[in-house]
Image: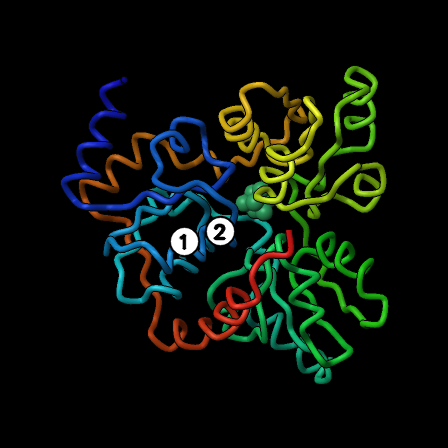
Amino acid sequence: MSNIVEDIINAKKEKNAVILAHNYQIPAIQDLADFVGDSLALAVKATKVESDLIIFCGVDFMAESALILNPEKTIIHPNPKAKCPMAAMVDVEGLRMAKKKNPEATVVSYVNTTAEVKTETDICCTSANAVKVIKSIEEDTILFVPDSNLGLYAQRFLPDKKFIFWPGYCHVHQDISVAQIQDLKASYPIAEVLVHPECSPDVIDIADFVYSTEGMAKHCASSDSKEFIIGTEEGLVHRLKKENPDKTFYAISDAICPSMKKITLENTLDALRNLKPRIILPDEVIKKARAPLDKMVAIGRQD
Ligand code: SF4
């Protein structure tokens, strides 16, 4: 074991901290985390951990959500530069204007949004429950922010709803191309193709299955297939290989989120030792942003 990993384990014990890590984190962070999951699993986990100190290895909005759901706990985000570019595509002023233009619409925000945007949101969702969340809404018109690809995917199952899409996207999933999937499929013809709903509609059209990262993990564990093409950020493949040592996984080349990779062993150790950078949000924001997150957590997963 390298010294830095040992130092992190010791500092974690000494501080009685819990490390939560997203599926897209570097393998070394995933390996020392207490829990690895997608944004919904992490949000739920954050409400259940007993420790008062959470080191959140993921991007900004995930650490903010952990604080909103646990305002009494200390949430440390090892690198404040680890920000999701898609979450930055919608700001609270822009959302207020869109609400004024569409007063009849129910605002559904992907959890990949800032805490401020959540204060203007009726209900949040993740890629693991977008269809289930929107199905639960009585109103006909949905203002869906910010991921237009996830919104378009949900719309396939909800033809009676009128969707208003925000022009946002995840650059990592948007860049996964039909040609990349077809090339991998030509090389590995018996592999099942799993893609994330943040992918573009033409990629979704040629996939065998569409899942959140947690849904992919469940599917790969239970499927009789031995080979899988994984259409999401490459970090998930580390977890899939660990959980399924008898199966083979093919990642999409260049499907790498630079923001997720900004969390390193070095800044995680610094965060543990110094208990900063700490996530701080105004009480009013925490209060208002909590309602749409609580509703999302209560609805649970669809995959
Ligand atoms: S993978 Fe996409 S949605 Fe996730 S943090 Fe990176 S840019 Fe944001």
SS label for mark 2: helix
Q: Is residue 14 left or right of residue 205?
A: left
Instruction: Report the amino acid beneath label 2.
Output: Ala
The image shows residue 277, relative to residue 1, as above or below, that is below
Query: Position of 11 compared to 69: left or right?
Result: left
Identify the amino acid type marked 1: Lys
Residue 89: where, in percent of width, then height? 61, 57
Q: Which circle marks residue 108 in the picture? A: none
Where is ligand 1, by quadrant? top right
Up-down: is 187 above or below 173? above
Q: Residues within 10 Å of mark 2 (few under 14, many from 20)?
A: some
- In whole angstroms, how far apart are the C-alphas of marks 2 and 1? 6 Å
Residue that appears at 43% across and 36% down:
262
Residue indicated by mark 1: 45
Q: Is residue 236 above or below residue 166?
A: above
In the picture shown, does residue 185 fall above or below 297?
above
- The N terminus, quarter of image: top left
Q: Are marks 2 and 1 in contact (CB under 8 Å)?
A: yes
